[in-house]
Image (tube, grey):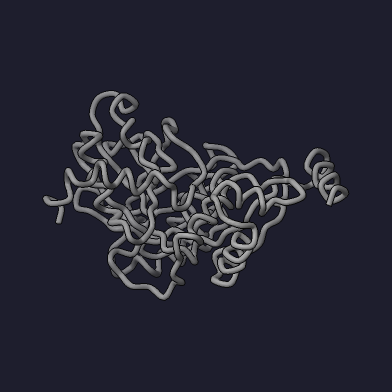
Amino acid sequence: SAEILVRIQRHKKGGPFGEIKAILDPRAFHYQSAWVAMRIGGEPTSRTEALWRHPGVIYGCERDHELNVWFFIAAPLDHDLELHVRCLEKLAGAEETLFLPVQKVFKGADFLSSLDSETFQTMHERFEKQQKTDLPELDPGEIEIIRQLQEPFPLTDTPYQEIASKIGITEAQVLELTRSLAGKGCLKRIGSSLKHAGVAVGVKTLVLWQVPEEKLDRTGLEIAGFREVLYADRRPAHPEFPYSLYTMIRTETTSELEPVMCRIQERIGKWPYRVLETLRELKKEKIKYFPKGLDEWRRVHCHAVETAFH
């Protein structure tokens, strides 16, 4: 084991290894997620602290639009995700809020990883409200192991013993729970990730399209065929925000976006679109599945809007 640890450290310093970590598959979790757009008056950074304190909000930014604050929120399926959003709406004093869960994906894995694959592991965004699923049930012990496996993996002779000591169980129990998670498809493996090559990523731009309902699926498949389109999905349209096709487009420079848009319109038609520029990022961190503070946050805050919402 000592020789293995030396090799790992050598490969991390001068070789292709990134961090040693658990490779989880969130598709096997009871998890749901959505984007939220808010209109918040005044200086956004002074009124949005309540949003960033939520344990399930992992990304937030200010965009060049009347709906100026956008954030991504995720929670286990036994939470009412929209109730969390309505509570945040009240805490932030938002003048308008749009709840924007994914409805259909035409290209890519999820919006968040297409935005920044270096920071966000693919999670396959999903929203299911009060629906039974055929996903495996997870007991409290397995959820605790998921929490621990998201921490840096101990590079010692006895890593599972170190995990066991943190949560007050035996090493044998840790191994049993870890095998159970692997059997349920929640854990792919524990190993090294590869360091990303220094490839220029270009400019990524969020472009929203207003497409008629009856043409939306066909248009989504057409637009997914462009190599510049990293991601494309369908989300709810609203009278005040009539865009339902969301695309992330990558170009080498900002000036190259317009020619790409012209080529896309030649194929899909001259549908109205809106380029949403990100003015600044307000929160950005990797997702933590089943964070311990989430249940407490719900207990403290959600009662204020729960009765009226239901």
> Would you say 161 lies left or right of 285 here?
right
Tell me if residue 260 can be seen: no
Identify the residue at the far left of this view: 308
**Placement of 13 over or under 114, stated as above or below:** above
The quadrant in which residue 46 appears is top left
Image side of residue 209 versus residue 29, left or right? left
Regarding residue 189, the answer to whether it shows in the image is yes
- 162 or 118, which lies in front? 162
**Residue 42 higher or lower than 269, as above or below:** above
Q: Quadrant of residue 42?
A: top left
Q: In this view, does 13 lie above or below 306?
A: above
Q: Is residue 111 found left or right of 22 in the rendered image? A: left
Using the image as rendered, state which of residue 193 and residue 101 is in the foreground.
193
Image x and y of residue 156, in percent = 74, 46
Residue 107: image location, x then y, percent: 50, 62
How many numbered marks appear?
A: 0
Nearer to us in this view, 143 or 267? 143
The residue positioned 73% from the left and 46% from the top of the image is: 155
